Structure formats: C-alpha cells, structure tokens
Amino acid sequence: MENNQKHGHKRLKLCVSGAAETGHCGPSALDKAKELGAEIVNHGAVLVTGATTGFPLWSAIGAKEAGGTVVGLSPAATEREHMEVYRLPVDYHDLIIYTGFGYSMRDILLTRSTDAVFLGCGRIGTIHEFTVAFEDNKPIGILEDENWETDEVFKMIIEKGHRPNNKIIFDKDPKRLVERIIELVEKTKVEEYRLTQKPPAD
C-alpha cells in the first residue's frame, strides 16, 4: 500500500472529450461513454473531463460506478460560477479544478495536463480539443460510431493537415480502444525518456 501511495504520480491521466448536448449523437452514445469511463479506471488510470454535461459526464458516471477517480477542469473561476453561470454539474467528480479561463483555455489545459485524449461524438468544443491534442502530438483515441459525424470531420482534418501522425487510433470498441491507447502512451513515455537521456561521456 505504501509503495502504491509513493508512486501514485505514475497513474495515467486520460481525458474524455465529447458533446455537452448529446441529442444528435444517437441512442448508443451514453452507454458507450459509460463503458469508456469504466474501462479507463479499470485499467488503473484517472479519468479527467471538462467538468461538463453530456458525453463526458456519462463517462464520469461509468468511471465512478467502476470505483475510479474522476477529476474535472472547469471553465469557471469558482464553484458558484460553475453552477450558476455556466450551469454545469458537480456530480460524479472527486475533484473539480476551477480554472477561470473560459472554455477555450480550459480545453488547452485539459488536453495538455493529460497523457492521452479520448473523443466521442461532439461539436466545435470537441473538435477544438482534438486540434489542440493533434498539434501537441498527443496520443488520441477516437471512439467511432456510424451515427457520429465528427468521426468524418476528424479524418478530414488529419488528411488535410498534411502532417504525419501515428498517435491517432480509431476504434468502435471502448475496451479495445482504451487498451490500444494505454499501450501507445506507455510506448510514448519510454521514447520521451530515452530522448532526455544524455549520451555517456567519452
């Protein structure tokens, strides 16, 4: 137990992004969000969301039902502003950090403070978080569904971006997607560690 506490910083922090309003996402979206959240914590990681409604909230519900830890990054400066001005929930989160930076800067903090980003159905906010993660060469897991138009938007951005990126994974199965992304994150961490090591002195 003591060893686990000492090395708690090594737990992966995995972000879930998606639509705050899911009416356009189809009937399977919320179940997929819950499964995604549950799989993240079942693999020992911490779920991080934008402390919002919709797809990310349902992933938080899945994570909490599976006994995991959920952290939210709010666009608001205070809990009162979070609830009364932004009208966002505080449920199903162990900790909410009130950034005070609004949605656009919150998105940047959300993606940069995590080890990988998972994307469900969404609109402009989800696309923004994708582009930030894409620009940062962050591991990205895109959960596919035939009802989600954002899948095609992501593919178009990747194609038109003319920038090689081997850290983006598409998959229809939440469990398999989480496993593939965690494997990619661990590989990325090893590569980054090697790059920081100084060559031996002659």
Image: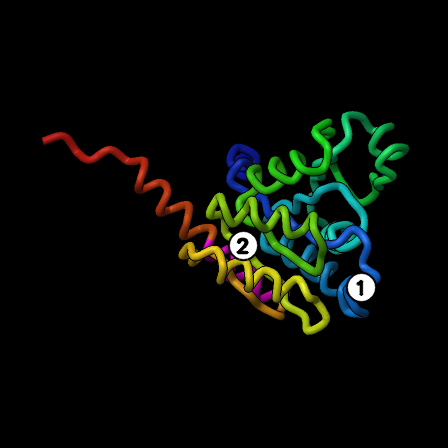
Residue 180, magenta (yes or no): yes
- Across and down, in percent, residue 109 comes to 61, 35
Task: Give the labeled residue for mark 1.
Answer: 24
Q: Is residue 140 above or below residue 151?
A: above
Label 1 amino acid?
His
Magenta part, dominant SS: helix
Q: Is residue 74 visible?
A: yes
Tag count = 2
Residue located 77% across and 64% down the image: 25
Query: Mark 2 — residue?
Result: 140
Q: Earlier in the sequence, mark 1 or mark 2?
A: 1
Residue depicted at 72% across the width and 71% down the height:
147
Quadrant of the snapshot with the N terminus: top right
Q: Nearer the viewer, residue 77 or 93?
A: 77
Please state the extent of the stretch shown in magenta in the rendering: 175-184
Q: Is residue 90 left or right of residue 161?
A: right
**29 or 187: which is nearer to us?**
29
Instruction: State left or right for residue 195 relative to residue 83.
Output: left
Considering the image in quadrants, where does the C terminus appear? Answer: top left
Taking the spot 70% from the left edge, 67% from the top edge, the residue there is 148
Residue count near mark 2 (Cα–Cα under 10 Å), binned few <14, some 14–19, many ≥20: many
Above/below status of 5 relative to 52: above
Outermost residue on the left side: it is: 202
Q: Position of residue 136 (x, y in %)?
A: 48, 43
Residue 78, image x and y in percent?
80, 26
Q: Using a 10 Å C-alpha cutoff, classify the residue at mark 1 as few (fewer than 14 neighbours), some (14 to 19) or many (20 or more).
A: some
Q: Residue at x 75, y 55 (%)?
A: 55
Farthest-out residue, front: 160
Percent x, y of residue 200: 17, 34
